[in-house]
């Protein structure tokens, strides 16, 4: 009713770009994957449409085929790019480099495509959807609203919180049994399809496609718009993209020689004044308001019957046979042989550098060992990755509490159940089902009253207890704990000790505890194993070990070997 033709034209384009910026934000803002490659998926969708309509012809059926191709081809490329970026062992910087290389490759293919792709001139003059200027404006607006609402519903759902969990602490996700590689590949693939849909809209609305639509310069612009609008908020990239694209288009007409300088200066001011973007400022203000408001009670805690590991195991739960680990020529673990049965609480003690943490790592990652065999519940774990070992019934608590800082206590606990109890990707549940042992830990430590509190606001001791509750929520058969009492008060230590005794004596969990506090170890262990210089030097009852000459010599700094 009130926009002129110029504004309708520019805003149509801006809204299509905003759809693309939402995909960048889901990847970067929510899942922490910095990507410059969304422009390439967009370009592939746009070129698939334009090439089909130019070379095959235009009809309602062919436009339908173009739509399918514009989504399907980017989806297939997304699967390949996702796999290349997130195979096991790849690093975040590697994924970002792939996202830079991919648009360069696509752009070069378009340049060398001759008449098929129109080379540097692009493709123009094909007949797409028969909608006028206003028709495309409305269609783009409707698509943007659908994508934005879909993204909002997803990121606020229980399943959508997995993206934030991956961004916060991917290692913890893997040790909760989640296959983070697969989740990231799936996300890349689906968002490549959405970018392709935006490409289809663009090719129809603008009537022209050019190599610049696929390049990493455009990919970088999308990242900048997302950052300025507000990373990690769905509203931010929409505001940032529409605002800056519209402003750039207006200024380029009115100030042809100055507009880039004005936009550049605006970028600098925005980054200094609002480093987290415009929408993040709004979120911070609303969150501050919420902090002063009385905290909501959070979801209702419900005791769930165990769904996991009902089968009885014959023989020891953990069996280590001549385990070895070397870093280059340095042997860190040598000839370790040890069995642990259900219900045992075995403490692993030894001076600094004895190899205790390394041994914990070998028990939870089948690619860590250099020799020997480790069996858990009878299965050789050689070559298995952490999430596969978690599925065998192993829960690991790290030395420094490994939780998700931007999630609430309840959301962290829900993450711990995600591998067993698939969460909804549409809704956020108001009940939280946990094994009764995990609920008991929450009640003993008072965390049951803090379910809706953000983890970054918890004390060190509360985070340690939360991590223990998360590990127990996995329904493991065996828990590995690396110095769970480090930095805790006397009262907190006693609580953790009580919990561990209950888990092993009454509930039949096996536990391996790495600990320096010998008084704590003496109070709760059923057996103590002493490591020294990578070798197992003693394995016996609490009395045998505490009164042994070897232990006294090692702890007084002597060398018995
Ligand atoms: N990634 C690595 N590369 C090379 N050497 C390593 C690596 N990780 C550990 N080490 C070495 O392995 C040895 C055992 O280390 P580890 O952390 O397992 O000991 P620890 O008994 O847990 O000690 P602390 O009680 O201090 O935690 C040390 O000599 C350490 O320097």
Image: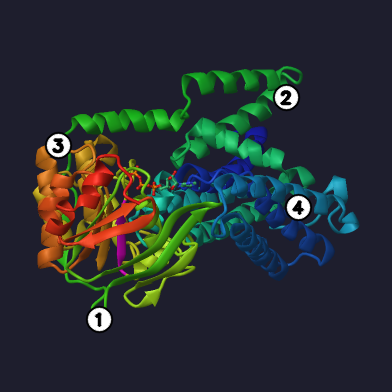
From this viewpoint, is residue 446 visible? no
Residue 241's image quarter? top right
Q: Nearer the viewer, residue 508 or 16?
A: 508
Which mark, residue 253?
Answer: 2
Disc 4 under 8 Å from ligand 1? The reply is no
Give the CA distance from mark 3 to mark 2: 66 Å
Q: Earlier in the sequence, mark 2 or mark 4?
A: 4
Expressed as whole percent of the image width and height from the top left, the position of residue 51 reads 79, 60
Give the CA distance from mark 2 to mark 1: 73 Å
Q: Earlier in the sequence, mark 3 or mark 2?
A: 2
**Which secondary structure, mark 1?**
loop
Reading the image, the residue beneath label 3 is 489
Q: Is residue 95 magenta?
A: no
Give the CA distance from mark 3 to mark 1: 38 Å
Expressed as whole percent of the image width and height from the top left, the position of residue 284 reads 35, 30
Reading the image, the residue beneath label 4 is 106
């Amino acid at each position: 009713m009130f926009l002129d033709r110029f504004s309708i034209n520019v805003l149509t384009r801006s809204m299509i770009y905003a759809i693309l910026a939402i995909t960048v934000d889901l990847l970067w803002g929510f899942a922490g994957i910095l990507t410059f490659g969304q422009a390439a998926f967009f370009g592939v969708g746009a070129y698939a449409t334009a090439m089909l309509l130019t070379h095959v012809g235009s009809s309602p059926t062919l436009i339908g085929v173009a739509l399918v191709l514009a989504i399907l081809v980017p989806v297939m490329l997304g699967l390949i790019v996702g796999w290349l970026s997130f195979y096991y062992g790849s690093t975040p910087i590697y994924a970002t480099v792939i996202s830079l290389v991919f648009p360069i490759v696509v752009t070069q293919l378009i340049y060398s495509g001759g008449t098929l792709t129109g080379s540097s001139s692009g493709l123009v003059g094909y007949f797409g959807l028969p909608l006028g200027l206003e028709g495309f404006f409305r269609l783009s607006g409707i698509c943007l609203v659908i994508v934005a609402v879909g993204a909002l519903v997803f990121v606020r759902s229980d399943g959508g919180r997995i993206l934030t969990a991956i961004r916060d602490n991917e290692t913890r996700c893997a040790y909760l049994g989640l296959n983070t590689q697969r989740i990231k590949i799936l996300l890349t693939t689906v968002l490549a399809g959405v970018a392709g849909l935006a490409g289809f809209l663009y090719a129809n609305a603008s009537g022209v496609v050019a190599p610049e639509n696929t390049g990493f310069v455009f990919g970088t612009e999308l990242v900048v718009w997302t950052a300025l609008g507000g990373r990690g908020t769905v509203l931010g990239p929409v505001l940032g993209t529409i605002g800056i694209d519209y402003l750039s288009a207006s200024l380029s007409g009115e100030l042809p020689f100055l507009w880039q300088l004005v936009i550049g200066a605006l970028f600098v001011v925005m980054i200094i004044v609002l480093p987290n973007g415009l929408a993040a400022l709004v979120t911070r203000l609303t969150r501050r308001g919420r902090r002063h408001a009385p905290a909501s009670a959070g979801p209702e805690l419900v005791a769930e019957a165990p769904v996991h590991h009902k089968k009885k195991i014959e023989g020891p739960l953990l069996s280590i046979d001549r385990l070895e680990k070397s870093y280059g020529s340095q042997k860190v673990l040598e000839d370790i042989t040890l069995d642990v049965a259900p219900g045992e609480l075995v403490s692993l003690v030894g001076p600094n550098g004895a190899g205790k943490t390394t041994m914990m790592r070998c028990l939870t990652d089948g690619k860590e060992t250099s020799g020997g065999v480790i069996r858990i519940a009878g299965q050789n774990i050689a070559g298995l990755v952490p999430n596969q070992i978690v599925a065998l019934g192993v829960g690991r608590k790290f030395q420094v509490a490994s939780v998700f800082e931007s999630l609430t206590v309840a959301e962290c606990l829900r993450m711990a159940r995600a591998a067993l109890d698939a969460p909804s990707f549409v809704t956020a549940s108001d009940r939280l089902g946990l094994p009764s042992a995990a609920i008991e830990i929450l009640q003993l430590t008072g965390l049951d009253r803090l379910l809706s509190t953000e983890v970054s606001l918890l004390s060190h001791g509360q985070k340690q207890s939360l991590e223990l509750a998360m590990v127990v929520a996995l329904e493991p058969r065996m828990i590995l704990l690396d110095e769970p009492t480090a930095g805790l008060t006397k009262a907190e230590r006693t609580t953790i000790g009580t919990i561990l005794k209950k888990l092993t004596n009454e509930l039949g969990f096996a536990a391996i505890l790495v600990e320096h506090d010998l008084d704590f170890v003496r109070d709760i262990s059923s057996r103590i194993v002493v490591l020294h210089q990578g070798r197992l030097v003693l394995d016996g009852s609490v009395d045998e070990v505490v009164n042994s000459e070897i232990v006294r010599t090692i702890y007084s700094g002597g060398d018995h070997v």
